[in-house]
Amino acid sequence: MIGNGEPHCQNIDPNQEKDFLTKPDAPNPSDYRRQPVHPTRGGSSASTITVGDTSEPQAVDSNGLTFNTAWAVYTHQHKRYKDQETGIEKLRVWVMDTVSQHYLESACEPVETIAQWYSNLKEQCRQTEQATKSRAREEYRAAIKPLTKPPKDFEAWVNKWEHSMSHAKRKGVADATDTHVWFEDLSIALKEMPGLESCVTAYGVSAKAEIREGTLSFRTLANDLREELRRRSKFGKA
């Protein structure tokens, strides 16, 4: 959802300990006092600094920093803070413009921080991915259910099997990623189909090395099955 390349994403991963910058406080001139160069008898021995006053000697605070140094540090910190806030706002707008309304309503509460949005979206997507994988597994199992009679459209059956294989493999379904397993599943599905069972068996023998090495393409097999079905139809065998 939100990753590298998107606006200001470095700080928002909840798995990292890097914190957001907090708004810095401007130095208070009343905290800086100095000794006059020529104190007068009976006069005050110290005076409060005025913002922008660069006369000597310079006053310091309790930490030994001069006002000018403290102001320079504050200016730098404030700029970084403002850059961060601008980046966060841009990121919020980007999320609201690109994330679906369903996810916005379920994972991006307006009162939550952008880090909470990120965490919620990751969890939401993880659950969605698990559900998608489960559906792909069910689709694959349905496609390899052993046939008890020839389907009305055998080529459509092959197309459905190929689609289920593609989807299941893309989603990481174990059976679809193991060449030996999915080939055996297909062989069992076609076991009761006259003529085709021997065709698949012969195919397994000729492609034994590819099956063992995991290099046999299910798409190649699907194309070969369709070609065999067309050949058999042409000669009245199916």
Image: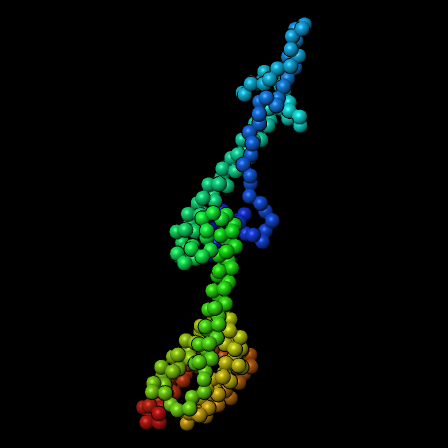
Looking at the image, which residue is at 52% across and 77% down?
A: 175
Looking at the image, which residue is at 51% across and 51% down?
A: 116
Determine the image quadrant of residue 50.
top right
Residue 215 or 91: which is nearer the viewer? 91
* Residue 223 visible in rendering: no
Q: How is the image coloured?
A: rainbow
Q: Can you say which quadrant of the picture contains the C terminus?
A: bottom left
* Residue 184 visible in rendering: yes
Q: Find residue 53 and report its horizontal and vertical position in percent.
A: 56, 18
Residue 101 as seen in the image, left or right of residue 115: left
Residue 24 or 198: which is nearer the viewer? 24
Residue 224, placed above or below residue 49: below
Looking at the image, which residue is at 54% across and 20% down?
A: 52
Q: Find residue 93 and report its horizontal and vertical position in percent.
A: 41, 47
Q: Find residue 231 and report its horizontal and vertical position in percent.
A: 35, 89
Looking at the image, which residue is at 38% across and 87% down?
A: 228
Determine the image quadrant of residue 165.
bottom left
Q: Find residue 101 and report its horizontal and vertical position in percent.
A: 39, 56
Determine the image quadrant of residue 54.
top right
Residue 179 or 42: which is nearer the viewer? 42
